[in-house]
């Protein structure tokens, strides 16, 4: 999908998933949401929201299918190149670079369309992170839409969506739901259901068995099978569907029961009720964006928050990103040191000296987080909730750059002041014996990890909490309060 078409799709779909009903009923005229719902009517308002979701879902499905079709020949060509030569030999060749760049671009567009569908999920579940995460599984990913049963899913969803009081969301178009095929909402009955849509007589029979809670239906089919191979295949299929059904049922029950099984670790999980308000540095970000787009002649603005620095840049380039890293180097990391660049003129000559080259490598190693990459992290609030529409579109089409530097030492000091008793631990020692999921989730700074001690219990700072800062724009103070509450 070319950039112009991609941008147009974003500009069309974002209002459909975010504000369709609010725009239609002009909610700004009401003093409060409660007054609006009272005058408009809850069911009427929700149905209008769902109408926006239905229109958006059609465009998201079409967008994802278009991207997948466009990706196929590039993936095929890449496979052919890899089969002809060693990867080390072709990596520097132009055809390889061009193809991988295009595949990367299409992969990003796919993630953005899924992120738009994630907005629907987060809205349906009223922004309840715990509920949404209960529908996620380790190594979750959806199969190819073209090779799956997308036609049946579309037809079934359209059947439900003809009813103005119902909305059926196809879960395969999201990246944050890995259970069930459809989420079906009924605004009249105020119910939510997770539904499996399976093709084939065997799947129909298994679902009939589960629906009627009558094992004799499956037993009759099993006894009629002619050989052990067919029986074994049926039992494996039955077990697979049963496990999916149990996971879905447990996920739906988790918010009410308050306890469940963490599918990522295998441990028991519990819901902890807190009154913590998730504070954000969004007002400062909005102010910087407003200056950048309206009042300022500058192409970039830097500002600080309680645990780092943020750069907002119009028409970002790699050089402007390096400028920000350079600024970080001499304001935070080595504020008292002289810059080697200043000793050499012109700048071109400076780059030929080893001391400047080493300095430049040091700058490039400074980690920056770009919120556009949030689309690859489905466990966090979709980026569209935290940015104005125009800036969100610009960010996702490379017309705007937002770079965030997280200052681990500053965060360490804040944790210390708030009684978390932080310390730096050896990363390899910490992950020893842990699962792949746990190892990948622990924040790493070089060969160190950040450890806390609360009530004589040790726990690690994870990327999940870091991403709340750099992708959701939460303040460090807010995250520290959450860390204390969860332990």
Image (tube, rainbow, N blue to C red):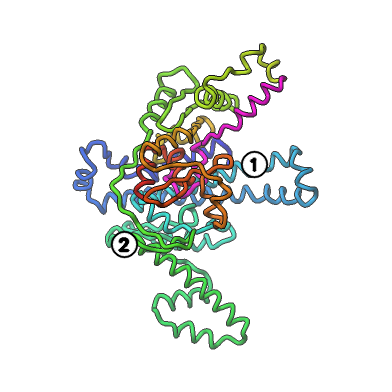
Res 256 label? 2
* Quadrant (top left, top right, bottom left, bottom right) of the N terminus: top right
Residue 79 place in picture, x, y as percent: 72, 51
Whether residue 315 is visible, yes or no, is no
Q: Residue at x 64, y 29 (%)?
A: 361
Q: Which of the two labelled residues, at mark 2 and mark 1, occupies the earlier sequence position?
A: 1
Q: Residue at x 59, y 80 (%)?
A: 232
Pointer 1: what residue?
102
Q: Nearer the viewer, residue 444 or 172?
A: 444
Q: Residue at x 26, y 51 (%)?
A: 44
Q: Is residue 452 magenta?
A: no
Q: Nearer the viewer, residue 18 or 287?
A: 287
Dot 1: within a 10 Å radius of its alpha carbon, few (fewer than 14), some, or many (20 or more) residues? some
Which residues make up the magenta segment?
353-382
Q: Is residue 366 magenta?
A: yes
Dot 2: within a 10 Å radius of its alpha carbon, few (fewer than 14), some, or many (20 or more) residues? few
């Amino acid at each position: 999908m070319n950039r112009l078409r991609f941008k147009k799709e974003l500009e069309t779909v974002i209002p459909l998933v975010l504000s369709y009903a609010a725009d239609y009923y002009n909610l700004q005229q009401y003093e409060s949401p409660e007054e609006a719902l009272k005058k408009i009517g809850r069911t009427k308002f929700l149905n209008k929201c769902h109408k926006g979701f239905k229109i958006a879902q059609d465009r998201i499905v079409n967008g994802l299918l278009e991207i997948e079709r466009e990706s196929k020949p590039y993936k095929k060509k890449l496979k052919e190149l890899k089969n002809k030569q060693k990867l080390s030999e072709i990596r520097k060749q132009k055809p390889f670079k061009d193809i991988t760049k295009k595949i990367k671009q299409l992969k990003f567009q796919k993630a953005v369309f899924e992120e738009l569908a994630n907005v629907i999920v987060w809205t349906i579940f009223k922004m309840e992170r715990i509920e949404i995460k209960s529908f996620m599984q380790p190594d979750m990913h959806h199969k190819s839409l073209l090779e799956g049963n997308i036609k049946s899913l579309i037809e079934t969803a359209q059947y439900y969506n003809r009813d103005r009081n119902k909305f059926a969301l196809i879960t395969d178009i999201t990246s944050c739901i890995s259970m069930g095929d459809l989420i079906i909402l009924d605004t009249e009955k105020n119910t939510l259901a997770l539904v499996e849509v399976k093709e084939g007589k065997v799947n129909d029979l298994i679902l009939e068995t589960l629906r009627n809670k009558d094992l004799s239906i499956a037993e009759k089919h099993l006894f009629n099978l002619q050989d052990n191979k067919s029986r074994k295949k049926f039992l494996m299929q039955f077990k697979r569907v049963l496990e999916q059904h149990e996971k879905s049922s447990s996920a739906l029950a988790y918010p009410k029961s308050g306890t469940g099984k963490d599918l990522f670790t295998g441990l028991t999980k519990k819901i902890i009720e807190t009154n913590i308000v998730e504070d954000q540095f969004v007002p400062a970000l909005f102010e910087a964006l407003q200056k950048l787009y309206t009042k300022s002649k500058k192409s970039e603005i830097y500002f600080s928050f309680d645990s780092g620095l943020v750069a907002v840049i119009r028409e970002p380039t790699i050089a402007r990103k390096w400028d920000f890293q350079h600024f970080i180097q001499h304001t935070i990391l080595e504020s008292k040191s002289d810059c080697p660049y200043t000793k050499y003129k012109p700048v071109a000559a400076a780059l030929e000296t080893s001391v400047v080259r080493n300095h430049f490598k040091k700058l490039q190693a400074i980690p920056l987080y770009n919120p556009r990459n949030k689309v690859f992290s489905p466990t966090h609030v979709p980026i569209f909730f935290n940015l104005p529409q125009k800036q969100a579109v610009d960010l996702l089409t490379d017309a705007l750059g937002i770079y965030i530097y997280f200052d681990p030492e500053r965060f360490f000091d804040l944790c210390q002041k708030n009684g978390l008793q932080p310390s730096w631990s050896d990363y390899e020692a910490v992950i020893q014996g842990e699962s792949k999921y746990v190892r990948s989730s622990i924040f790493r700074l070089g060969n160190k990890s950040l450890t806390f001690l609360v009530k004589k219990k040790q726990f690690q700072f994870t990327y999940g909490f870091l991403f709340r800062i750099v992708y959701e724009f939460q303040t460090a103070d807010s995250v520290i309060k959450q860390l204390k509450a969860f332990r």
